[in-house]
């Protein structure tokens, strides 16, 4: 489909590995159950991570991205 529009994928990355366990928790306790203690704690951790960007957690996420990355990023160029 991309090639048909003159696009070429030159790189694929996986991102947001630390967000995957959050969704696993939500699936376990109920997707709309925002009040479950584990969901609340993990959400708090994710917010802290986004704002503070601690080096150890950044390293952990970069290590886990290829294994459990929640998002796939396609880098395209028009050829």
Image (cartoon, helix red, strand yellow):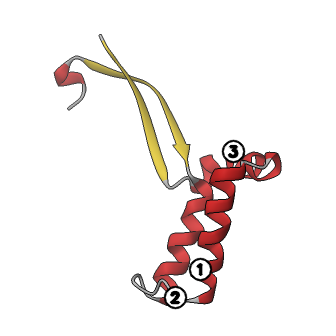
7 in relation to 60, above or below: above
Q: Which residue is mark 3?
A: 62
Residue at 18%, 22% (x, y): give it. Answer: 5
Disc 1, SS = helix
Mark closest to the chain's N terminus, 2 or 1: 2
Q: Quadrant of residue 55?
A: top right
Q: Residues within 10 Å of mark 2 (few under 14, many from 20)?
A: few
Mark closest to the chain's N terminus, 1 or 3: 1
In-image side of 43 versus 70 (left or right): right
- Quadrant holding the N terminus: top left
Residue at 53%, 44% (x, y): give it. Answer: 14
Q: Nearer the viewer, residue 20 or 6?
A: 20
Q: Residues within 10 Å of mark 1 (few under 14, many from 20)?
A: some
Residue at 39%, 84% (x, y): give it. Answer: 32
Dots 2 and 1: beta carbons under 8 Å? Answer: yes
Distance CA(mark 1)–CA(mark 3)? 23 Å
63 in relation to 45, above or below: above
Q: Nearer the viewer, residue 60 or 68?
A: 60
Q: Which residue is mark 2?
A: 35
């Amino acid at each position: 489909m991309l090639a048909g529009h003159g696009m070429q994928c030159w790189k694929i990355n996986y991102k947001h590995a630390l967000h995957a366990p959050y969704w696993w928790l939500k699936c376990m306790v109920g997707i709309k159950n925002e009040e479950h203690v584990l969901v609340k704690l993990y959400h708090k951790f994710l917010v802290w991570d986004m704002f503070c960007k601690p080096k150890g957690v950044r390293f952990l996420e970069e290590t886990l991205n290829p294994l459990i990355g929640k998002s796939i990023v396609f880098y395209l160029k028009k050829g």
